[in-house]
Image: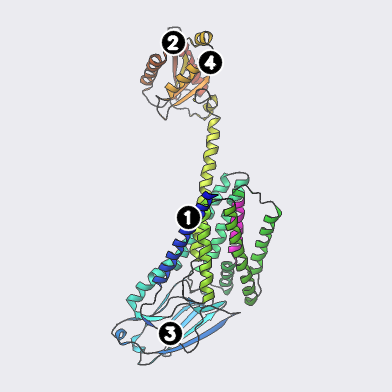
Amino acid sequence: MRKNAKYVFLSLGFAFALMFTNVYLLNKFSEPKGFMLDSWTSVVPFYEKVNGPSTKVLRMHFSLPQELENNEVLALIFQKVIANKVRIFLNGELIGQYGSSSGNLWPAPIVVRIPKHLLKDENELTVELFALVNYGISYVPYICSYEEALKATQLQLVLRNNFNLFSIGASLFMTLLMLMVGYAVVGISKRQYLYLSGSAFLMSLGLVQFTYRETSFLDFWYIFYEKMAIVVPVPVLTLIYLYIAERYGRKTSGLRFKLLEIVAVLMTLLVLLAPTIQIFHVFSEISQIYALFLMILTLWQILYVEAHEFYFAIFFLFLTALQSIVVLLSRSPGELTLPYGRMVYLLAICFEAIRHFRKISKQKEELELENYIDSLTGAYNRKYIDLLENDGTLVLMDLDKFKEINDKYGHHKGDEFLAKFANLIRSNIRSEDVFIRLGGDEFCLVLKGKDYREVVDRLYNLVRNHLGLSFSYGIANLNEARDFDEAYRMADEELYRRKRGEV
């Protein structure tokens, strides 16, 4: 229990440290670095939901500071515009238009070049926001030189839009990887990897709405991806919860787990099939509350089964979710860190699944290998012959006068001699050579090198010097024989000729 508490506090500490570092850096890179445009004639919406196609018009007047007048090229920066389409007018002239009725603008900053010939002593700036679901401006727009604007927004583009593009690619890669792993395993493990592949694929769909698009081609697709972004945490967390339950020996065929699956399906369908935007907003809030419940449930389960490898990821996900909720509720400028939490969590789950698969594969390989190992000598047994390729030199070996050792000292002593003999041979052959016990005191070697005569002579001398025994042997070329049995007969004939002193 004390050890588990140590893991909990260490993981929570690292999660806090990473989350606050993430928030600090994201907000640091988003700080306005020019002339702030904050004197609007009406309240600028931070994040406002609408129930259908809506347009919001914002106006303000400003006089350009003298220090900016000397710049040849100026730019107006919107760090985050939540809308499908935005049009910007300066003194009645259109200077920038982005998006469409199905566009998705917020994941990328907008940089608008300001034509200097339109500037006056007193200027009017008009911004039209068009939205199907929601609109807003999360940071105060500002004016600076065009070169500084590009520098200021480049990193934001990488950390926001490009990161989400990377996350989509990573999620699809994990989907394919988990499907491949699931195909290779059997039984309950197969279901575990299907849970993971399903969660990774759904997460990739949910991340599409976190990428910048000038258009989604149809309003339907924009609304579909918006719905997916809202509801996808429910099935993703449900599948991961089921994975962890089965991963740690809990059967998911019980009523409680079936109810979780049913609720996840119903919740997803309610959001995706919502007939109006207004109803969608209602269902989306319900699904977000339920997703938070699932996150807490998953956190409790991970702590309950003491799955130390998941502590950091679930804590980080939980903290980023809370941070995103605080930003939205407080209506204060700030980057949402939840996409980072989702990605870290999914990566942790998938890496652990891969590690678990490698462990299972190694155990299976070891068990299979045990079927081919002779328990007394550590050499391969006769079953291994079926795995041999028809390549190399077969050396058949038979210990001389071994029966006399058994008769004089007993079978126990004979077994000791066999074990010592096998250990001596195995310790003095190359890794690519194969040593097999055929039965009793009969062994064989499959040598890959061309120096097989030198190898056999060296082994013969080692056995005589260390054990005081000798062995007879016969040699056959596997490449010249039809199969192992024919090579065995050829080597056996030479062995007995050698025993009779004919060789």
The extreme left residue here reads: 70
Q: Is residue 239 magenta?
A: yes
Callout 1, which amino acid?
Leu
Dot 1 or dot 4, earlier in sequence? 1
Q: Which residue is mark 1?
A: 10
Residue displayed at 36% across by 77% down: 33
Callout 2, which amino acid?
Arg
Tell me the mark number nearer the camera, choosing from 4 and 2: 4
Question: In the rendering, at what x and y percent does residue 485 appear?
Answer: 52, 21
Cβ atoms at labels 1 and 4 below 8 Å apart: no
Q: Which residue is mark 4?
A: 412
Question: In the rendering, at what x and y percent does residue 51 appear?
Answer: 61, 79
Callout 4, which amino acid?
His
Tell me the mark number nearer the camera, choosing from 2 and 1: 1
Name the secondary structure under disc 2. helix
The extreme front residue here reads: 2
Dot 3 or dot 1, earlier in sequence? 1
Q: Which residue is mark 3?
A: 38
Dot 4 or dot 2, earlier in sequence? 4
Dot 3 or dot 2, earlier in sequence? 3
Name the secondary structure under disc 1. helix
- Residue 498's disc is 2
Name the secondary structure under disc 4. helix
CA distance for labels 2 and 1: 70 Å
